Amino acid sequence: MANVRLEIILLGDGMSGKTSILIKIAEIVLEQAMEEYQAMLVRREIPSHEEWLFRVKPTLDERELEKIIERRPLLKHVPQAQYLAWLELAEPQIIGFEDWLKREGILLEDILTKDTSLATLGLETFEMRFPLGRHYLFVSGYDLGGQNVYDHLRNVLAGLAKPESYLLIVFDSSRYISCENSVRQLEDSIKKFEQRGKATPTIVSIMNKIDLHRYLDNAKRQESISHWVFEALVKAREEGYQYQFPHVIKKDEVIELSIEPTTKLGFEHLEAIIYDTLRRNIHDFGKPPLTELNARSVARELAARLLLLQQPEENFEQFYEELKKVIFEERPLAVQFMGGFKLKALRGEIPQDELLSHVRKKFERFVFDLERVTKDDVHMAIKKSIRTEQLERDLRLFSKRVFKTNALGGEGIVDLFVYLAYQETTKAEQKSIERADVRGKGSLKRL
């Protein structure tokens, strides 16, 4: 089998879903590997998964199988997990799936066990190898953190990218303002390539979270969210507000804050109240598409849109640019960082006001007037946040392809991966033909 190498570089803003896309690609690789493994089992006269489902599984105690799966993190990503657990019990002489993967050099565990609730920090590398038709496909590359603090790494990476690399630029299709920042990053990278006289890698744009986009594009849901958020903002103005949000570092810990009645609300409180409103009112909160991370992203985008609706025309452009910059630098939710400040403090408990002052300094320009807000404003903010048609048109000007994906559910990921694999295997086959032609011509000369 011929070796084919595919280098992928994942870029995008924070919480765009880059790592989820990488995990889904790894699951596709795992699925392909499972087909190869089952073919080996059939040759050894082991019942196939389909045969096992009908003949063997009904007679088993599934609790024993689940115990094995719990000890094998990789099996949780395989639909045939119980079948593989049974195989370990019933056919101990047969090499287990995980050991077979290692023997074949198909290394996926580090990717598949990544925690997507945490930010990608800095530069993370990955490598996958697996059989694909007549080839062994080696997929390697870089997953780059989306925070603005890593811009210098973006520039280094852009300088290191080779013409044969694929730059996968991931956009959150439900966060228009954040998408604009990603487009700007993409344009800057292209300019740097051109200035250095380098061949530009293949640029593929990915509009991710299309399931969340569809979720927010529902008229009835927009009406409900508008009502809930508006009522919460009225309460903050008239009675004050108490809300909860997740700790930025301690995964299962919650931080609680109280706001006294006010007419001016800082951006950090505005996005947190919107998040808290979604958490309290949507019965399936925390499940796709409104996962915990997606809820934070939605809250940030809506808060930004509400602020923009209050800006006078003469100040709008400057305000918009400053707001986009801060949004790109700071991950949702802003107040989550209070937990980080508290952990870093050398002394004991710090008063809530002092902690909030750290956050306020980053967002001091951005204050929302609660006396001017209407329910229609909230509705308009939702509609504006999902207007990404122009974004798609812009992307097609410099992207080889634009894919629409739902990384959590897997929608569109197979198409993306097939495209990448087809591009590289086709190149490899073409090079093989060209080498054969050269060898043939050489032998004719010798004759």
Image (cartoon, helix red, strand yellow):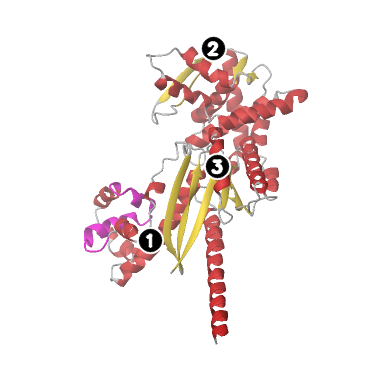
Q: Are marks 3 and 2 in contact (CB under 8 Å)?
A: no
The residue where tag 3 is placed is: 156
Write the residue at 56% across / 53% down: 162
**Residue 325 % position (x, y):** 62, 30
State the separation of the CA atoms marked 1 and 3. Answer: 37 Å
Task: First in sequence, mark 3 or 2: give its number.
Answer: 3
Residue 84 is a magenta residue: yes
Q: Secondary structure at mark 3?
A: helix
The residue where tag 1 is placed is: 34
Q: Are marks 1 and 3 in contact (CB under 8 Å)?
A: no
User: Looking at the image, which is closer to me, 118 or 143?
Assistant: 143
Write the residue at 40% across / 48% down: 112
The residue where tag 2 is placed is: 260
Which quadrant would residue 254 be assigned to in this image? top left
Q: Nearer the viewer, mark 2 or mark 1?
A: 1
Q: Is residue 112 among the parts visible in the rendering?
A: yes
In which quadrant will I find the C terminus?
A: bottom right
Q: Nearer the viewer, mark 3 or mark 2?
A: 3
Q: Which residues are magenta?
A: 70-95
User: Looking at the image, which is closer to me, 70 or 242?
Assistant: 70
**Residue 303 % position (x, y):** 61, 27
Numbered circle sitting on residue 82: none
Residue 74 is a magenta residue: yes
Q: Main secondary structure of the magenta part?
A: helix
**Residue 111 % position (x, y):** 41, 47
1 with respect to 303 (left or right): left
In this rendering, the answer to whether 387 lies above or below 3 is above
Near mark 3 (Cα within 10 A), the count class, few <14, some 14-19 or many ≥20, is few
Which quadrant would residue 179 be assigned to in this image? top right
Which quadrant would residue 309 be assigned to in this image? top right
Near mark 1 (Cα within 10 A), the count class, few <14, some 14-19 or many ≥20, is some
